[in-house]
Amino acid sequence: MDELTTLRELLDIMHEHDLDAIKVTVEGAVYEMVRREAAPAAMPVYAAAPAATAAPAAAPTGQAPANVKKIVAPLTGVFYRASSPDAESFVNDGDRVNAGDVVCILEAMKLFNEIQSDYAGTVVRIIPQNGELVSQGDDLFWIAP
């Protein structure tokens, strides 16, 4: 069963039984959903960063070099490089990161999930563009020791 189908089924269960929250483990993945009242003023609004050039960004080609560690998306969501549109990016190309450092946010179903690096090293490539939808398992960052 794919993640989107699982999330839709959990939402249906929440609505059918008028639940405020649900936490379920499905095939080793933990899904926790909490109903919240709409609060447009409290939720940040993100806009995709304008492209620096008129040409579209090139997708990464080929495989990562052998010494590169990959940070992959643990869930499907919208990729954000900063905590808000006015904030500085968590990391940029060439930055040093330590294991446990927050490198980005993935928004899924109005929940903002901080993604941490599992590795210490230098960011050699940031794959998705700010505001881009990424799928579970997609490469987000390449980290060189």
Image (spheres, rainbow, N blue to C red):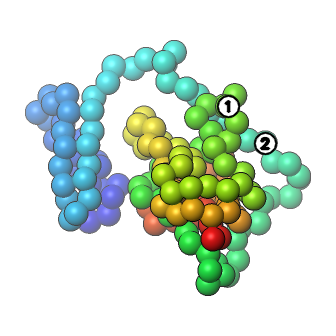
Query: Residue extending furthest right?
Result: 53
Could you tell me which residue is drawn at 61 percent across and 84 percent down? 66
Q: In the rendering, at what x and y percent does residue 113 appear?
A: 44, 43
**Amino acid residing under circle 1:** Ala
Work out whether residue 10 can be spotted: yes
Q: Is residue 72 above or below residue 83?
A: below
Q: Which residue is mark 2?
A: 50
Q: In the rendering, at what x and y percent does residue 119 appear?
A: 52, 63
Task: Determine which quarter of the picture holds residue 13.
Answer: top left
* Total numbered circles: 2
Nearer-N-terminus badge (2/1): 2
How packed mark 2 is, by other alpha carbons closer than 10 Å (few <14, some 14-19, many 20 or more), is: few
Query: Residue extending furthest bottom?
Result: 66
**Amino acid residing under circle 2:** Pro
Q: Is residue 84 above or below residue 75?
A: above
Given this view, does label 2 or label 1 mark the residue nearer the observer?
Answer: 1
**SS for callout 2:** loop
- Is residue 10 found left or right of 49 in the rendered image? left
Q: Which residue is mark 1?
A: 87
